[in-house]
Image (spheres, helix red, strand yellow):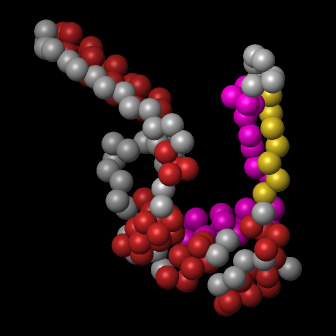
Amino acid sequence: MLHLLFKKIWEEEQVPMDWKKGHLVKIPKKGDLSKCENYRVITLLSIPGKVLNRVLLNRMKDAADAPFRDEQAGFRKDRSCTDHIVTLRIIVEQSLEWNLSLYISFIYYEKAFDSVDGRTIWKLLRHYGVPEKNVNIIRNS
């Protein structure tokens, strides 16, 4: 059943409207629950839509991963912040051992993905070799 539906989506490059909608759920954190910042919001999405997105991701994984250097660990399979922590610790230990000055800067990009222009994303996907059909389906989902 899903195969037939995905085939139709692939041919028409259109995703069902229900798959584009999400249901927002507030999850309380600690603290005063009368304040918005003490809630985490998650979005419940359509399961078939999530499956379709996984199929698309798997089809474009190589193109999406290509521009990243090996040092990039965030948002990559089998990598995590732990990789960066270990690397940083080694650098700090070596600088202490060699009596070198070391300056470290951390940048926190709060809500960085909320401010990305969609047109830029489509342009970058094409630039890195993601097929136009995939870009169109992603844009329409």
Residue at (51% x, 37% y) in the render: 110
Residue at (80% x, 85% y) in the render: 4
The answer to whether 6 is drawn above or below residue 44 in the figure is below
Q: Does the magenta stretch include residue 43?
A: yes
The answer to whether 73 is drawn above or below residue 52 in the figure is above
The answer to whether 91 is drawn above or below residue 15 in the figure is above
Residue at (53% x, 76% y) in the render: 135
Observer-nearest of 101 and 91: 101
Counting from the top left corner in percent of width and height, residue 23 is at 82, 53
Residue at (39% x, 25% y) in the render: 86
Counting from the top left corner in percent of width and height, residue 108 is at 44, 32
Q: In this view, does 29 lie to the left or right of 139?
A: right
Q: In this view, does 139 lie to the left or right of 47?
A: left
Q: Does the magenta stretch include residue 20?
A: no
Q: Main secondary structure of the magenta part?
A: helix
Q: Quadrant of residue 136?
A: bottom right
Label count reads 0
- Report the magenta residues as a range: 36-59
Q: Is residue 96 left or right of residue 139?
A: left
Counting from the top left corner in percent of width and height, residue 45 is at 78, 57
Whether residue 138 is visible here, answered yes or no, is: yes
Residue farthest toward the bottom in the current orientation of the protein: 11
